[in-house]
Image: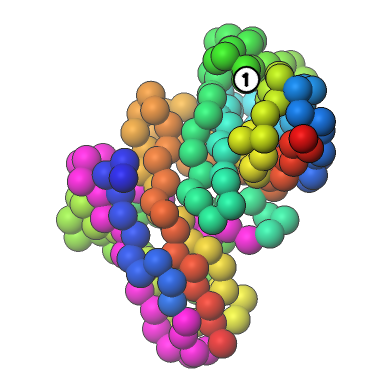
Amino acid sequence: GENVEQHPSTLSVQEGDSAVIKCTYSDSASNYFPWYKQELGKRPQLIIDIRSNVGEKKDQRIAVTLNKTAKHFSLHITETQPEDSAVYFCAASVDQGAQKLVFGQGTRLTINP
Amino acid sequence: DAGITQSPRHKVTETGTPVTLRCHQTENHRYMYWYRQDPGHGLRLIHYSYGVKDTDKGEVSDGYSVSRSKTEDFLLTLESATSSQTSVYFCAISTGARGYTFGSGTRLTVV
C-alpha cells in the first residue's frame, strides 16, 4: 500500500521568511496530494491540494509543487506570519472512489517574531 | 460546522469496556472515514464507509468495528478498550472537490 514520508518533523523560521515542507510517496498510482493545517486542539483543515496533471499550484502565500517522476511534493509558505504556526500534514491517494488518504507524520511549524 | 459532528468530545473509560464513538453528517455524502491521531504517526485510517452498510478496513483496524445503518451516521466501536487505543479519533467526510472535512475529534483515554 501507499506510504508517505514527511520532513522535517519540526521547523522553526523567522517571521517573514519562507518555509518548505517535503513529502515523498511510494505508490505511483496516487494522483491526489492535499495539505492540511492543524492548529492546537483543532481539526485538520485543507489548505491546498494538487492533482497529478499539474506540477505547481499557488494560493496567495502558499504553493505546492509536485514531481511525479521522483514521487515527491512540497509545500511552500512565503512571507510567514505568526498565524502560520501549526502542524502541517501532507497526504496522498488515488483520486477516485473512496479516496483513502494516507497521511505523512506531520511537521510542527513555529514562526518566531 | 461543515455539517459533521462527533460525539462525545472527550471520554475516559476503563480497560476492557466497550466504547462507541459517533459521527454524524448533514450533507448526505457517500464516503465517511474514521482516523486516529497519535504523536509521530500523523493520521491513520481505521475504517471507512462507501455507503449504507458498506464498510471496509483501513491500515489500523484491529480491535475496532464500524457500522453505518443510515447515510448520516457512522459509528466506531472499540469492543474491549485497551490502553493502546488511547488516542484522538477523527471522523471525516469526502466532499469531492473540497477534499476531506474533518469532525472536531474525540479524545479517548483508556485507563
Q: Residue flagged by tag 1: what amino acid is it?
A: Ile
Q: Is residue A96 above or below residue A98?
A: above
> Which residue bears the numbered disc 1?
A62
Total of numbered circles in the picture?
1
Q: Residue furthest front?
A: A113
- Locate the C terminus of chain B by quadrant: bottom right
Q: Is residue A26 above or below residue A1?
A: above
**Residue A113: % across, % down:** 77, 35
**Residue B70: % across, % down:** 18, 56
Q: Is residue B82 above or below residue A53?
A: below
Residue A52 counted in the magenta span = no
- Residue A55 seen in the current view: yes
Q: Left or right: where does residue A28 sit relative to residue B24?
A: right
| Image quadrant where residue B82 sits | bottom right
Residue lying at 50% horizontally and 51% vertically, measured from the top left: A42
Q: Left or right: where does residue A41 sit relative to residue A79?
A: left
Residue lying at 62% horizontally and 20% vertically, measured from the top left: A62
**Residue B71: % across, % down:** 20, 50
Q: Nearer the viewer, residue A13 or B110?
A: A13
- Residue A90 seen in the current view: no
Q: Left or right: where does residue B109 sit relative to residue A15?
A: left
Q: Nearer the viewer, residue B107 or B79?
A: B107
| Image quadrant where residue A91 sits | top right
Q: Left or right: where does residue A111 sit relative to residue B106?
A: right
Residue lying at 68% horizontally and 59% vertically, measured from the top left: B39
Question: Regarding mark 1 in the picture, which secondary structure is present there?
Answer: strand
- Locate the N terminus of chain B by quadrant: top left
Q: From which residue to which does the magenta span run?
A: B12-38
